[in-house]
Image (tube, helix red, strand yellow):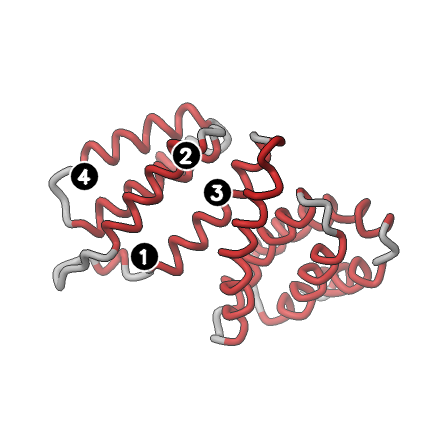
Amino acid sequence: MRRSHAASGNPSLALRFAHAAVEHSTRALPLVRARAWGRLATAHASAGDPDGFRHAIDQCRRLIQQRHSDDPPSLYYLTPQQIDAEAGQALVDLAAHLPGRRSPLLREAAGLLAPIAVQGPAAGFRRSGILHGIHLVRASIGARDSEATAHWISALADHLPHVQSIRCRTLLTTVRTRASKQLRAAGRTDALDAINTALSRT
Protein backbone atom coordinates (compact mmCIF):
# COMPACT_ATOMS: atom_id res chain seq x y z
CA MET A 1 0.00 0.00 0.00
CA ARG A 2 2.78 2.44 0.88
CA ARG A 3 4.62 1.62 -2.33
CA SER A 4 1.43 2.09 -4.33
CA HIS A 5 0.89 5.48 -2.74
CA ALA A 6 4.51 6.47 -3.30
CA ALA A 7 4.21 5.63 -7.00
CA SER A 8 1.05 7.68 -7.49
CA GLY A 9 1.55 9.99 -10.45
CA ASN A 10 4.81 8.27 -11.40
CA PRO A 11 4.08 5.56 -14.04
CA SER A 12 7.68 4.36 -14.27
CA LEU A 13 7.89 3.84 -10.52
CA ALA A 14 4.46 2.22 -10.44
CA LEU A 15 5.54 -0.22 -13.16
CA ARG A 16 8.71 -1.08 -11.28
CA PHE A 17 6.82 -1.82 -8.07
CA ALA A 18 4.12 -3.76 -9.94
CA HIS A 19 6.64 -5.93 -11.82
CA ALA A 20 8.42 -6.63 -8.54
CA ALA A 21 5.11 -7.67 -6.94
CA VAL A 22 4.34 -10.06 -9.81
CA GLU A 23 7.79 -11.64 -9.55
CA HIS A 24 7.58 -11.87 -5.76
CA SER A 25 4.18 -13.60 -5.91
CA THR A 26 5.16 -16.29 -8.44
CA ARG A 27 4.66 -19.12 -5.91
CA ALA A 28 1.79 -17.52 -4.03
CA LEU A 29 -1.88 -18.51 -4.13
CA PRO A 30 -3.64 -17.62 -7.40
CA LEU A 31 -5.71 -14.87 -5.75
CA VAL A 32 -2.56 -13.19 -4.43
CA ARG A 33 -1.02 -13.43 -7.88
CA ALA A 34 -4.21 -12.02 -9.39
CA ARG A 35 -3.89 -8.99 -7.12
CA ALA A 36 -0.33 -8.41 -8.31
CA TRP A 37 -1.27 -8.75 -11.98
CA GLY A 38 -4.19 -6.36 -11.50
CA ARG A 39 -1.83 -3.73 -10.10
CA LEU A 40 0.48 -4.29 -13.06
CA ALA A 41 -2.43 -3.78 -15.47
CA THR A 42 -3.23 -0.44 -13.83
CA ALA A 43 0.41 0.60 -13.99
CA HIS A 44 0.63 -0.23 -17.70
CA ALA A 45 -2.50 1.84 -18.35
CA SER A 46 -1.10 4.81 -16.47
CA ALA A 47 2.05 4.51 -18.60
CA GLY A 48 0.02 4.43 -21.83
CA ASP A 49 0.90 0.82 -22.72
CA PRO A 50 -2.22 -0.93 -24.13
CA ASP A 51 -0.52 -4.27 -24.87
CA GLY A 52 0.93 -4.48 -21.38
CA PHE A 53 -2.44 -3.58 -19.91
CA ARG A 54 -4.30 -6.25 -21.93
CA HIS A 55 -1.82 -8.99 -21.05
CA ALA A 56 -1.81 -8.15 -17.35
CA ILE A 57 -5.59 -7.83 -17.01
CA ASP A 58 -6.09 -11.14 -18.84
CA GLN A 59 -3.69 -12.83 -16.42
CA CYS A 60 -5.55 -11.27 -13.50
CA ARG A 61 -8.94 -12.49 -14.75
CA ARG A 62 -7.60 -16.01 -15.30
CA LEU A 63 -6.07 -16.27 -11.84
CA ILE A 64 -9.05 -14.84 -10.01
CA GLN A 65 -11.09 -17.87 -11.07
CA GLN A 66 -8.78 -20.19 -9.11
CA ARG A 67 -9.95 -19.50 -5.57
CA HIS A 68 -8.87 -21.54 -2.54
CA SER A 69 -10.34 -22.00 0.91
CA ASP A 70 -7.17 -20.56 2.44
CA ASP A 71 -7.16 -17.34 0.40
CA PRO A 72 -6.16 -14.28 2.46
CA PRO A 73 -9.26 -12.73 4.08
CA SER A 74 -7.89 -9.30 3.17
CA LEU A 75 -8.57 -10.06 -0.51
CA TYR A 76 -12.26 -10.79 0.02
CA TYR A 77 -13.12 -7.83 -2.22
CA LEU A 78 -11.17 -9.13 -5.21
CA THR A 79 -14.06 -10.35 -7.35
CA PRO A 80 -14.64 -10.30 -11.12
CA GLN A 81 -16.76 -7.18 -10.58
CA GLN A 82 -13.89 -5.47 -8.78
CA ILE A 83 -11.56 -6.31 -11.65
CA ASP A 84 -14.11 -4.88 -14.10
CA ALA A 85 -14.12 -1.68 -12.06
CA GLU A 86 -10.33 -1.44 -11.99
CA ALA A 87 -10.13 -2.22 -15.71
CA GLY A 88 -12.73 0.44 -16.49
CA GLN A 89 -10.83 3.09 -14.56
CA ALA A 90 -7.57 2.00 -16.22
CA LEU A 91 -9.12 2.27 -19.68
CA VAL A 92 -10.09 5.89 -18.98
CA ASP A 93 -6.45 6.57 -18.07
CA LEU A 94 -5.23 4.70 -21.15
CA ALA A 95 -7.53 6.70 -23.44
CA ALA A 96 -5.87 9.90 -22.28
CA HIS A 97 -2.55 8.59 -23.63
CA LEU A 98 -3.94 7.34 -26.96
CA PRO A 99 -6.06 10.05 -28.61
CA GLY A 100 -6.30 8.05 -31.83
CA ARG A 101 -7.99 5.20 -29.96
CA ARG A 102 -9.86 7.30 -27.42
CA SER A 103 -13.42 6.57 -28.54
CA PRO A 104 -13.32 2.74 -28.46
CA LEU A 105 -11.36 2.73 -25.22
CA LEU A 106 -13.84 5.04 -23.52
CA ARG A 107 -16.79 3.01 -24.81
CA GLU A 108 -15.21 -0.11 -23.36
CA ALA A 109 -14.61 1.69 -20.06
CA ALA A 110 -18.22 2.86 -19.89
CA GLY A 111 -19.44 -0.67 -20.62
CA LEU A 112 -17.50 -1.99 -17.61
CA LEU A 113 -18.25 0.87 -15.20
CA ALA A 114 -21.91 1.66 -15.87
CA PRO A 115 -23.40 -1.57 -14.43
CA ILE A 116 -21.30 -1.16 -11.27
CA ALA A 117 -22.21 2.50 -10.85
CA VAL A 118 -25.91 1.66 -11.19
CA GLN A 119 -25.80 -1.45 -9.01
CA GLY A 120 -23.73 0.13 -6.24
CA PRO A 121 -26.42 2.46 -4.86
CA ALA A 122 -29.17 -0.14 -5.41
CA ALA A 123 -27.16 -2.79 -3.55
CA GLY A 124 -26.28 -0.50 -0.65
CA PHE A 125 -22.74 0.26 -1.80
CA ARG A 126 -23.24 3.94 -2.50
CA ARG A 127 -19.60 4.86 -2.05
CA SER A 128 -18.66 2.33 -4.72
CA GLY A 129 -21.39 3.68 -6.99
CA ILE A 130 -20.08 7.22 -6.58
CA LEU A 131 -16.46 6.29 -7.25
CA HIS A 132 -17.34 4.42 -10.42
CA GLY A 133 -19.76 7.17 -11.45
CA ILE A 134 -16.90 9.66 -11.18
CA HIS A 135 -14.84 7.61 -13.62
CA LEU A 136 -17.86 7.42 -15.92
CA VAL A 137 -18.00 11.22 -15.91
CA ARG A 138 -14.30 11.25 -16.81
CA ALA A 139 -15.07 8.87 -19.70
CA SER A 140 -17.99 10.94 -20.97
CA ILE A 141 -15.96 14.15 -20.79
CA GLY A 142 -13.21 12.49 -22.82
CA ALA A 143 -15.78 11.21 -25.33
CA ARG A 144 -17.32 14.71 -25.54
CA ASP A 145 -20.71 13.20 -24.72
CA SER A 146 -22.42 16.02 -22.82
CA GLU A 147 -25.65 14.08 -22.29
CA ALA A 148 -23.81 11.20 -20.65
CA THR A 149 -21.84 13.69 -18.56
CA ALA A 150 -25.05 15.37 -17.42
CA HIS A 151 -26.68 12.02 -16.67
CA TRP A 152 -23.88 10.73 -14.46
CA ILE A 153 -23.28 14.08 -12.75
CA SER A 154 -26.99 14.18 -11.85
CA ALA A 155 -26.87 10.57 -10.61
CA LEU A 156 -23.88 11.41 -8.43
CA ALA A 157 -25.73 14.39 -6.99
CA ASP A 158 -28.57 12.06 -5.94
CA HIS A 159 -26.26 9.58 -4.21
CA LEU A 160 -23.74 11.91 -2.57
CA PRO A 161 -25.89 12.87 0.48
CA HIS A 162 -25.88 9.21 1.52
CA VAL A 163 -22.07 8.91 1.58
CA GLN A 164 -19.64 10.35 4.10
CA SER A 165 -16.32 10.24 2.30
CA ILE A 166 -13.75 13.01 1.98
CA ARG A 167 -12.16 11.17 -0.93
CA CYS A 168 -15.47 11.04 -2.82
CA ARG A 169 -16.07 14.72 -2.21
CA THR A 170 -12.57 15.67 -3.37
CA LEU A 171 -12.73 13.56 -6.53
CA LEU A 172 -16.22 14.76 -7.33
CA THR A 173 -15.23 18.41 -6.88
CA THR A 174 -12.36 17.88 -9.32
CA VAL A 175 -14.49 16.14 -11.95
CA ARG A 176 -17.25 18.74 -11.58
CA THR A 177 -14.74 21.44 -12.45
CA ARG A 178 -13.66 19.48 -15.52
CA ALA A 179 -17.27 18.92 -16.61
CA SER A 180 -18.51 22.47 -16.11
CA LYS A 181 -17.36 23.92 -19.44
CA GLN A 182 -18.86 21.04 -21.42
CA LEU A 183 -22.17 21.16 -19.57
CA ARG A 184 -22.52 24.92 -19.84
CA ALA A 185 -21.86 24.76 -23.58
CA ALA A 186 -24.55 22.06 -23.89
CA GLY A 187 -27.06 24.07 -21.86
CA ARG A 188 -27.08 21.48 -19.05
CA THR A 189 -26.54 23.84 -16.14
CA ASP A 190 -29.27 21.88 -14.33
CA ALA A 191 -26.76 19.07 -13.78
CA LEU A 192 -24.18 21.53 -12.49
CA ASP A 193 -26.71 23.11 -10.15
CA ALA A 194 -27.63 19.67 -8.80
CA ILE A 195 -24.05 18.65 -8.05
CA ASN A 196 -23.20 22.07 -6.59
CA THR A 197 -26.16 21.75 -4.22
CA ALA A 198 -25.21 18.21 -3.23
CA LEU A 199 -21.61 19.20 -2.53
CA SER A 200 -22.66 22.19 -0.46
CA ARG A 201 -24.72 19.93 1.81
CA THR A 202 -22.04 17.33 2.52
Instruction: Tell me whether circle 2 and circle 1 mark residues in contact (CB < 8 Å).
Output: no
Whichever of labels 2 and 1 marks the residue nearer the N terminus, that label is 2
Say which residue label 1 marks: 78
Question: Is 127 on the left or on the right of 186, as rendered?
Answer: left
Point out residue 53 in the picture as x, y percentages from the top left corner.
40, 36
Say which residue label 4 marks: 25
The image quadrant where one finds the N terminus is top left
Kindly identify the amino acid type of the residue bearing the numbered disc 2: Ala
Whichever of labels 4 and 2 marks the residue nearer the N terminus, that label is 4
Whichever of labels 2 and 3 marks the residue nearer the N terminus, that label is 2
Front-most of residues 102 and 127:
102
Q: Nearer the viewer, mark 4 or mark 3?
A: 3
Instruction: Tell me whether circle 4 and circle 3 mark residues in contact (CB < 8 Å).
Output: no
Label 4 vs label 1: CA separation?
Answer: 16 Å
Label 4 vs label 3: CA separation?
Answer: 22 Å
Say which residue label 2 marks: 43
Question: Is 38 on the left or on the right of 145, as rendered?
Answer: left
* Displayed quadrant of residue 199: bottom right
Q: Nearer the viewer, mark 1 or mark 3?
A: 3
* Displayed quadrant of residue 75: bottom left
Say which residue label 3 marks: 90
Q: Provide the secondary structure element on which disc 4 rests.
A: loop
Point out residue 66 in the picture as x, y percentages from the top left corner.
18, 56
Kindly identify the amino acid type of the residue bearing the numbered disc 4: Ser
Instruction: Tell me whether circle 4 and circle 2 mark residues in contact (CB < 8 Å).
Output: no
Q: Provide the secondary structure element on which disc 1 rests.
A: loop
